[in-house]
Amino acid sequence: WQRTGEDWSDVRLTLSTARSALTTDPPRLTEDRLTLTDRSAAERRTVDVELREEEIADPGPAAVAGLPGVDDGGQTRVLRSPAPVRVPADGRAHRVPVSAFTTTARRAYSCAPELSPLVTRIARFDNASGHALLAGPVDLVLGSGYTGRGTLDFTAPGAAAELAFGSHDDYRVVRETEESRESATLTQRTVVTRTVRLHLSRFSGPGERSEQVVTLRERVPVSEVSAVEVRLREESCAPEPDAVDADGVARWELRLAPGGRRTVTLVYEISASGRVVGL
């Protein structure tokens, strides 16, 4: 957009992500005061733990509620329009073609039942544009129709990118949880066993015959203190996870035919010493 009072007709644009209006002064540090207190005898005998939620890097792209800004990855980028364009001086946003490329997309389906019972359709592709793709909002078109708006992460040339195309109504996911707690009399150790069952169903039309692979993700707590141990009971899982990453996220790649149903069982135990409170 531009508000110069004069329409730009048949001009070649050079666009920069530099923010010259921002201040160049370094931020001022404010006082951050820390105080120390002696722990009481009771506090020395116990370990207080609590569950903390942390956002991890990649469970898959999510839908965008508003209109985010464009992120250049921290480095100023210069983009040029390949052909002359016209930009009216009305202060409104106008689309300007900068580049275009064609690449092969790989379709996938993903679901994190703890967060949402919906199965999301994802397109994965490699950035074959020859330049970086800036992070920001994108309009999604599937087939011949507009499907909504999503977000694209900053993608280097040749790197892989993902776009989410919303939920797929052919799938249904039900999540069930069970928990049991045992305490040993002699060692005062508490063991909490949690069982998570995920029921995945596919309801497809008569014309659907091919199998689809759905990625299910379920998290296992990760302990940061030695007094609490978390163990995945692989012998009780059915089937065993295909992978468990360092963040404790278990992943299954499930093949599902039209009308098919699968059940996944995840079992893990949390063991804490008698000094632990808050579990």
Image (cartoon, rainbow, N blue to C red):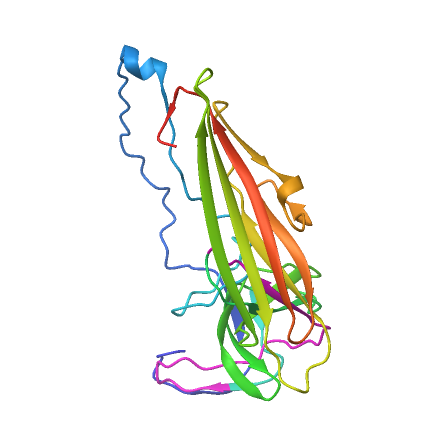
Q: Position of residue 127 (x, y in %)?
A: 68, 66
**Quadrant in the picture for the C terminus:** top left
**In the rendered image, the vertical position of residue 55 relative to residue 18, given as above or below:** above
Q: Nearer the viewer, residue 156 or 116?
A: 116
Q: Residue at point 38% right, 30% down? A: 49
Magenta span includes 90? yes
Q: Position of residue 92 (x, y in %)?
A: 37, 81
Position of 91 with respect to 76 (left or right) is left
Q: Residue furthest top?
A: 41
**Quadrant in the picture for the N terminus:** bottom left
Instruction: Examine the residues drawn in magenta and state their main secondary structure.
Output: loop
Q: Position of residue 241 (x, y in %)?
A: 66, 48
Residue 133 shows in this picture: no
Position of 111 with respect to 69 (left or right) is right
What is the span of residues highlighted in magenta in the rendered image? 86-114
Residue 278 shows in this picture: yes
Q: Residue at point 57% right, 76% down? A: 170
